[in-house]
Image (cartoon, grey):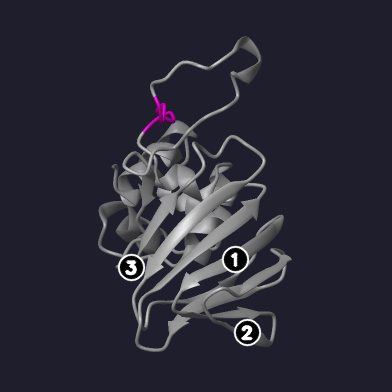
Amino acid sequence: MVEVGQQLRSLRKARGLTLQQLAGLTELSRTYISQIETGTANPSVATLKKLADVLGVSVGALFSDGPDQPTDSQPPLASGLADVRVVRHDRRKSLSWPGRPWKTYLLTPDLQRKLEVLLNELMPGDTVDEAYTHEGEEFGFVLEGQYEVTVGDDVYVLEEGDSISYPSHLPHKMRVVGDRPCRSIWVITPPSF
């Protein structure tokens, strides 16, 4: 997998933008963007979203090293089923967040459909401490552990088996609470990562 900084630099250059131009468009400093590109800074999800928006790509494009690869080599079962795709458990795409130890797996074959489904595996204390927004809706389901989701000014603590949904234009952030790892599934439409 290509590092986020390398992909950011590649996308910036493909669009003919200098560091200074990208800084002006994102309201981030040129130095900070340079540090992200060289891997010496760990941007927040909100920062990655801001960069992706200006570059005209999804956040997931910052984690990609090229076109989506097939997730299953089997041919379609019938001519009308060309859009059916299977993602095998050992062939999931993995997203890694800079400076974050948790694991996120893309359960849908790519980000070219109307929704994305993510599996998050987080450890106690893992947090997204900066609220962010994006287009669409989100649905989360906690498989195990406890997950605190803040939407606007309201805080919701989700236990195993609980779910939450909300419009993504509301500022939201999350963190693992308790002393157990947390596994959750998130459905986001339209794809934004």
Give the side of residue 137 with respect to residue 88, left or right.
Answer: right
- State whether residue 82 appears in this view: yes
- Confirm or deny contact between disc 1 and disc 2 (CB under 8 A): no
The Cα–Cα distance between marks 1 and 2, rounded to whole angstroms, is 12 Å
Is the residue marked by circle 2 packed among few (<14), some (14-19), or many (20+) residues within 10 Å?
A: few
Mark toward the start of the polypeptide (1 vs 2): 1
- Per the image, the residue denoted by label 3 is 100
Is the residue marked by circle 1 packed among few (<14), some (14-19), or many (20+) residues within 10 Å?
A: many
Q: Which mark is residue 12?
A: none
- Per the image, the residue denoted by label 1 is 140
- Viewer-nearest residue: 136 or 88: 88
Query: What's the residue type where badge 3 is placed?
Result: Arg
The Cα–Cα distance between marks 3 and 2, rounded to whole angstroms, is 22 Å
Secondary structure under badge 1?
A: strand
Question: Residue 185: percent from the left, percent from the top?
Answer: 52, 61
Question: Residue 144: percent from the left, percent from the top?
Answer: 45, 73
- Per the image, the residue denoted by label 2 is 156
- Viewer-nearest residue: 133 or 184: 184
Secondary structure under badge 3?
A: loop
Residue positioned most to the top: 79
State the residue at coordinates (62%, 19%): 81
Query: What's the residue type where badge 1 is placed?
Result: Gly
- Confirm or deny contact between disc 1 and disc 3 (CB under 8 A): no
- Viewer-nearest residue: 26 or 83: 83
Residues drawn in magenta: 66-72
Marks 1, 3: nearer the viewer = 1
Query: What's the residue type where badge 2 is placed?
Result: Tyr
Question: Residue 31: percent from the left, percent from the top?
Answer: 36, 62
